[in-house]
Amino acid sequence: MLTAISRRGLAAAIAVALLATGASAHHGWSWAEADQIELKGTIREISMAPPHPTLEVETAADGMWHVELGNPRQTERSGFVDGTAKVGDAVIVLGNRSLDPNEKRMKAVRITVAGKVYDIYPERIRAGG
């Protein structure tokens, strides 16, 4: 039989585990492949809203992709700010795609718009990237 104290401790441990699982599912890189790919397409939607600015990029070969950038401050530090790109602009995205091959989602480490390079995660760019 659990005492009131041990029940509270168990409830707290479960709550912490659930929060940690939710955070790791969204943040970090565990959901993405280690290898990086290059995606070329046209920006169809831009969101600069937290927790991560995103692009919806349409490619000729694979259709629509969801591209996550860094958190808003990190994305801004790269120079990519509201108004830098617009819907209809061509974009090249270097990043890590989802481990789920059926999911067209990637985390960008670098984006290039109109010849200007924005290194979102410069420390993660692979040699030759």
Image (cartoon, rainbow, N blue to C red):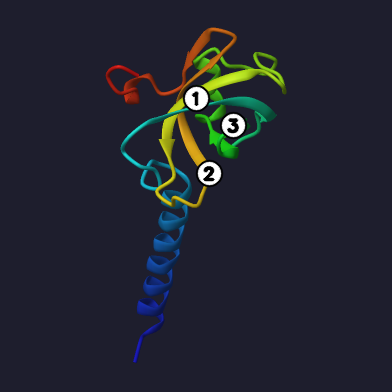
Of badges 3 and 2, the one in the foreground is 3
Give residue 59's position: percent from left, percent from top.
59, 31
| Mark 1 → mark 3, Cα distance in angstroms | 11 Å
Give the image quarter of residue 53: top right
**Residue at x-position 54% and y-position 12%:** 79
| Residue type pointed to by label 1 | Val
- Label at residue 59: 3
Q: Is residue 85 left or right of residue 107?
A: right
31 lies above or below 38 = below
127 lies above or below 48 = above
Residue at the far top: name it. 115
Q: Is disc 2 surrounded by few (<14), some (14 to 19) or many (20+) residues within 10 Å?
A: some
| Mark 1 → mark 2, Cα distance in angstroms | 13 Å
Q: Nearer the viewer, residue 40 or 19?
A: 40
Give residue 9's position: percent from left, percent from top.
37, 71
- Mark sitting earlier along the chain (1/3): 3
Query: Quarter of the image containing the C terminus?
Result: top left
| Residue type pointed to by label 3 | Thr
Q: Mark 2 and mark 3 in contact (Cβ < 8 Å)? A: no
- Element at label 3: strand
Residue picked out by circle 2: 104
Q: Is disc 3 surrounded by few (<14), some (14 to 19) or many (20+) residues within 10 Å?
A: some
Residue at the far left: name it. 127
| Residue type pointed to by label 2 | Lys
Q: Nearer the viewer, residue 64 or 4?
A: 64
Q: Is disc 1 surrounded by few (<14), some (14 to 19) or many (20+) residues within 10 Å?
A: many
Give residue 36's position: percent from left, percent from top.
36, 31
- Label at residue 93: 1
- Label at residue 24: none
